[in-house]
Every structure is written in C-alpha cells, then in structure tokens.
Amino acid sequence: MDTIASSAILNDGIIDGRLAARMVRKDVKQDVLSLRAEGIHPRVAFIRVGDDPASEVYVGAKVKACGWVGIRSEHVHLPDGTTQEELAGVINELNDDKETDAVLIQLPLPDSVGTKAALNLINPLKDVDGFHPTNLGGLLAGHGPLEPCTPSGVMRLIEMMGLNLVGKHAVVVGRSVIVGRPLAAMLARAHATVTLCHRHTANLKDHVRQADVLVVATGVTGLIRGDWIKPGAYVFDVGITRCEDGKLRGDVRFDEALERAAGITPVPGGVGPMTIARLLENTVRCARLVRGLQEPSIHRA
Ligand code: NDP
C-alpha cells in the first residue's frame, strides 16, 4: 500500500486499539462535562436476556467504560425464558423514559425472543448501536445520525492512523448486518473499492491477496493465513473467539500475518476497545438527538 500510515497507535506493525480508545474516551469525557454544564447527564440502558457468559462480560465492560467518562448506565438483566411481549414492554418503557437517552440490546438474544423484532422496537433516536433499520438506511443514504459501533470503530482507527483509502482495494470478509455490511458501505463512502466476501465466496484467498485493507469478521478462528496477506496491507481483525485453552483469538493468524502486514490489530486489544469507545460517543450523540440539540462537536469518521 503506497499510503504510509504513521501514528502513535501503530507500533512495530501492531495497531494499538486500547491506546486509540483512550484517546477517543478523553474527548467523550470532555463532551459529557459540557453536557452536564447544560444540565444534561447522559444515561444508557443495557438490556441483557438470559445467562450467556460472554454477554455478561461484554455488558460489564460497557458499564465500566461508561463510568470512566461520566455516563450513567443501567444494566437491565431479564431471565432466560423472557417472552417477546415482556421484552417489548421493557424496551417501550425505556423508550418513554425521559431519564434514558440510549438503549442497547446485548446480542445474541436467546431463541425465545426475536432479535429483529426487538431491535426494530428501539426508538431510532435512542438506538445507540445503530441497528434500527432507520439508522442503517441513514448510513446507506450518507451519514446516519447513529452508526454501528464496530464498523465505525474500524473506520476511526483507519482515520487515526492517517490511512488514505481513496482508490485502495478494501476486502471485507463477513457480511453480517452488524459488522460486514455497514463496514462495506463506510469503506465505499471513503472512496475505497470494496469486495465483500462470505461463506459462498469462491477462492477466498485470491480476494484476500488483493486487499490493501483487509477487515475480517467471521468468528472462524485462524481463517485467514499469513501468506494470504498482501505485503504492506493493513489488517483489522474483528473476530473474537474464546478457544478451548481459554484464550481469545481472532480470525487472522496473527503471528504469520504480522510478518507481511504493515499494520494489524491484535485480539484482544484491537477493534474491541474501539467498539466500546464508539458506543460512548453514540450515547452522547443520543443525549443530544433525543433533545433535538445540534450534532455534537465530537468526531465522526
Ligand atoms: P455472524 O455470524 O453474524 O457473521 C459471520 C459472517 O462471516 C457471515 O457473513 C458468514 O457468511 C461469514 N463467514 C463465516 N464463515 C466463513 C468462511 N469460512 N469464509 C468466509 N466467510 C465466512 O458474525 P458477526 O458479524 O456478528 O461477528 C463476527 C465475529 O466478530 C465474531 O467473532 C464476533 O464475536 C466478532 N465481533 C467482534 C466485535 C468487536 O467489538 N470486536 C463486535 C461484533 C462482533 P454468510 O453470510 O455466508 O453466512
């Protein structure tokens, strides 16, 4: 890739998502202070249904991060077996609650409740994860007011590293509604030429080999081999899987890939912290949106 990225967050080929997230949080904290001076204290509600251990950890991390920047948070934990109607009741209550600015449903939901139906019920102005069709549509139409946190976290890393995407070939592996598809739209918006791969893609490695920027979000540990990486490419590994040895691993074979890539995000410590940082930014944005206030001064990639 001819664009040389130089930034505090790129060290020896490793893209430091934790440092990048700290930099974003600093700005969010400042923004929360300004809002509080206007009598507004942002508050987000996290709804978790059932006892998925990973979801418990993720919500815990989000609650903690809110505390770091002065955002109020509430963890609404509903038992396994919660019905669609009961979940709808909780979402509607939070939609109506004047004290709640943002609502997040921690995924995955148990089979007893429909994910799409639940997400569609959230007031789009409080949709901090940006998964409501109104917000996803806004993203396709240009800049949505609230964009999904993981893809926008990747875009923010790219921007913080000073990577110029114009005319570059970006390959995204994984086409979920929460990561791959919105990210493909964001990369195209930044003038990259985008290839979106999935389970049915023929000759995946041939596509990956052409990537100046590669983003992988499949949940298949070690899917991408190091010798598939184009020398000098930038690699963003979204996948997180807890393996049998208890370690978290990504979708890219990190050590092999590091030998060829100009930059790669580690797992953990890469895209994950940026996802949470973007969530904090979106919470502040919701606090303004629900009050009909101007777009915040904080950054959007
Ligand atoms: P989904 O299961 O919803 O989507 C996975 C995607 O990967 C699908 O599009 C699927 O293709 C594709 N895929 C699966 N296997 C292959 C394969 N062998 N070759 C090519 N494509 C394949 O997952 P999510 O998008 O929700 O999450 C993906 C990963 O990212 C997970 O590990 C998840 O934990 C992690 N994640 C991390 C976040 C973070 O903050 N770091 C946030 C969100 C997710 P098809 O559509 O054809 O089925």
Image (tube, helix red, strand yellow):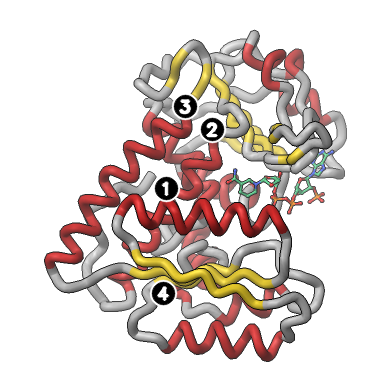
How far apart marks 3 and 4 lie (CA) works out to 31 Å
How far apart marks 3 and 2 lie (CA) works out to 7 Å
User: Tags 3 and 2 in contact by the CB under 8 Å rule?
Assistant: yes
Q: Is residue 244 visible?
A: yes
Q: For the C terminus, which image quadrant? A: top left
Relative horizontal placement of residue 247, taking residue 62 as reference (left or right): right
Q: Residue at x 86, y 44 (%)?
A: 200
Name the residue tied to disc 4. Answer: 125
First in sequence: mark 1 vs mark 4: 4
Q: Nearer the viewer, residue 5 or 264?
A: 264
How far apart marks 1 and 2 lie (CA) works out to 12 Å
First in sequence: mark 1 vs mark 3: 3
Q: Amino acid at mark 2?
A: Gly
Name the residue tied to disc 1. Answer: 277
How far apart marks 4 and 2 lie (CA) works out to 30 Å
Q: Nearer the viewer, residue 285 or 34?
A: 34
Nearer mark to the viewer, of 4 and 2: 2
Name the residue tied to disc 2. Answer: 269
Q: Amino acid at mark 3?
A: Asp
How far apart marks 1 and 4 lie (CA) works out to 19 Å
User: Tags 1 and 4 in contact by the CB under 8 Å rule?
Assistant: no
Label 2 Cα neighbours within 10 Å, binned few <14 / some 14-19 / many ≥20: some
Nearer mark to the viewer, of 3 and 4: 3
Label 4 Cα neighbours within 10 Å, binned few <14 / some 14-19 / many ≥20: many
Q: Amino acid at mark 4?
A: Leu
Q: Is residue 54 above or below residue 2?
A: below
The secondary structure type at the circle numbered 1 is: helix
